[in-house]
Amino acid sequence: MTAYDERTLPRPLPIGPAGYRTPGWWGVLALIGTEAAVFAYLIFSYFYLQSQTSQPWPPSGLPPLRWSAPSTAILLVSAATMWWAERGMRLGKLIRLYSGLILTLLLGVAYIVLQCFDWRGEPFLANSGAYGSLFYAITAFHVLHTAAGVLIVAAIAGWCALGYITPRRNSAVTVVALYWYFVVAAWIAVFVTLYLLPWITPHGGPP
Amino acid sequence: MAANPTFKTPVIAQPTGELRGKMEGMWSDPPGLYGWLGTTDHKKIGKRYLVTAFVFLMVGGIEALGMRLQLAQPNEHLLSPGLYNQFFSMHGFTMIFLYSLPILSGFSNYLWPLILGTRDMAFPRLNAFTYWVFVLAGIFLYIGFWGGKGTDVGWFNYVPLAERQYNPDWNVDVYSLGMIFLGVSTTAGAVNFIATMFRTRAPGMSISRVPIMIWGTLVANIGILFAVPAVSLDFLMLWLDRRFGTQFFNPATGGRPLLWQHLFWIFGHPWVYAIVLPAMSIVSQGLPVYCRRPLVAHSAVVLATILTMVLGFGVWVHHMFSTGLPVIAMGFFAAASFVIVIPSAVSVFAWVATIWTGRPVFTTAFKFFAAEIVLFVIGGVSGFMTAAVPLDWQLTDTYFVVAHIHYVLIGINVFPVVGGIYHWFPKMTGRMMSERLGWWNFWLMFIGFNLGFFPMHISGLEGMPRRIYTYPANMGWGDLNLVTTIGAFVFALGVLLFVINVIRSRFVGEKAPANPWDAPTLEWATESPPPSYNFAVIPRVATLHPLWEERLDGSRQSLLDEGAVLDDEHEIPATTALDAEPDAIMKMPHTTLAPVSLALLIAGTFVGLLMSMWWVAAACLLAMIPALLWWFWPRPEMGWAERARP
């Protein structure tokens, strides 16, 4: 039989999750899809309740940018360090990969700390009204995603230090980087919705 | 060979007895409890899904029979009003969440790798995990019932009735947390199906050669990915409202009860398609086999399936026509609901044309598949009717809607499922089901179903509201309800015969050959039941119907008895998403306790949250970190990592 042509089998094939679209890549893509949907439904709820209220929204004045603006910058930088680490791995520079992962991890922790300061400064609680409930739900949901991301990056950095991850065995880094970019992108959506839009289009209730 | 080779050229050979013996040794689970708890074999997991979901169907069915006895005549006192509320709520969520989707996951888990010509799902451990989470969530959802009070505000659990001030017991907390818990299983399963579809198809099974059954499940699971978050979020908000006093649904402080309904139905309507599209694809896959011809308009049916799911996300407000929304919004959603008829009709006409132009063989499976077409049309027409806003105002919350939902869910889910079992039972067990019992089984179910549920259309038109525990005699609904109750019991008798047929055939059924129905797809190319490794050599696919090529194309083009051997532990080829060209060899995991452990830790977390034992929840959550590290540890033997430096 001659049904096997050059493009199919037999030919040398890499063993294990090699290449770009590994099962892990598809898995994380699907995970990002479903998590992005949660953020979308949270933001839908926010705009829905805003559209239905006759009270000022947010009820206690414009949201402070004191902590959230720097934390946005920090997360943007962390996406860059993750990209820098990933590129380093592709180029075979393991030291760059390792230090890029550690930098990303530290920036992620810094964002979480800043968000805690932001919470401390807010004049309302999660049970003082629907706005507060949504505000804390959305921001806490994002902080949880970042915390999970920090733990995952820590695990990857550890495996990197143990010598498991090499330029040839890099799918774990690719997949985790994809998740991290999602965390940063989700924050941009949250930041624009919760912190920026009220400054641009203040919603003061009925005229 | 080196200890951890990076590349390998697969050997192409014909299967030998020696190879089969070696593969059996590598792929079968170790005996005993460890093998039972730790299996990642998609066939075992699929069968467990089928059995567990069917048990839930019978539990939900018993609840339904209780309600039917109560309603058989006016002013009965079998169930108290409170118990009746629990019965219809438990019946609803049991059937919709614990039966409808899991039973289809059972089929898909069992059949996907066989139909795709491979040896396991893309994530075998995740597959085991989804099953354990499903079982534990199912038990969790029932503890309220055993703990004194089950959830009693209907399966869609509207606020404010579901809020703490009107419903202070723990039953709604059980329901809320249980639904979030179950969502973990559903979502993880969806991720697995998507990765399996795009990464593990047999070489040569390009996107145009993917059988229809795969499409139905894939499309439904992509929908699940975007629909389930809405309901998980909704229930999380409700639980936070009840437990911590947040204000999501409280209008006094800016919340809105309608937010619950929006999020619930943004999930709820796509969910309808998630639990019917895979079942419709069972019909599309099975019916042509008994019509002795390929499905008419395969590509159109695939595209219609995709279109139905997409449109399914744009019709949720038709569940809320009576809530006083703006007319323009209702007009949009009514129009979208009408449009969905078009892709549905594509499937119906394709099935009818397949029967019409085929040479039907009237087996039991054929009868169930053909009945699905009839019931789908009836359920579709009643749905079409309620898409019209003024008629919906008249019919909403009456038995007309109850009739509609049951024609849809029993007609398009239960009938294809039972037909699917008759179709694939020989593959799963190596034995045929009794056709004689099957005849009785089918006619009892078909007549009982129509006798039971068709009169509900009339009682609904006569104004009988749903969810009432009894009704006065002077309403004149007594006779219709008696007929409904008799029909329900005839239907239940049919289901009982089905169970008897399954159990009996399992042990004394006639032995089944590899392909008893002379079907065209790959699952029939391997033995019945399939060996633990599915295929001794990996098939190479050249058409949509590999086993019918001699008849349809003149000669055999796919290669089934010669292929890649891949016999170095658990290996399968990874192929590209569109062309299915092999581009890597995947090393699959072995028997492991990681999935069941992680599922138990999640269960522990939810129990802790339910009982307000925060330390239990926190401890289980923390314990998940080492469990996940264990799971994802980069094992060189799986090709995930280089060997660690010495």
Image (cartoon, helix red, strand yellow):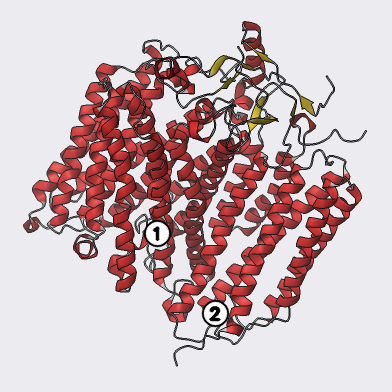
Q: Residue furthest top?
A: B17
> Mark 2 and mark 1: span between their CA atoms?
33 Å
Which residue is nearer to you in this view: A98 or A5?
A: A5
What percent of the width, then of the height, locates residue A28? 64, 48
What percent of the width, then of the height, locates residue B249? 44, 71
Quarter residue B508 falls in:
top left
Which residue occupies 76% across, 32% down?
B639
Residue A128: assigned label: 2
Q: Is residue B552 above or below residue B476?
A: above
Instruction: Quarter of the image for the N terminus of chain A: give it.
Output: top right
Which residue occupies 58% across, 82% down?
A198
In the drawing, does residue B537 fall left or right of residue B63? right
User: Is residue B62 at all visible to an observer of this figure?
Assistant: no
In the drawing, does residue B519 fall left or right of residue A59? left
Give the amino acid at mark 1: Gly
Residue of label 1: B314
Helix, strand or loop at mark 1: loop
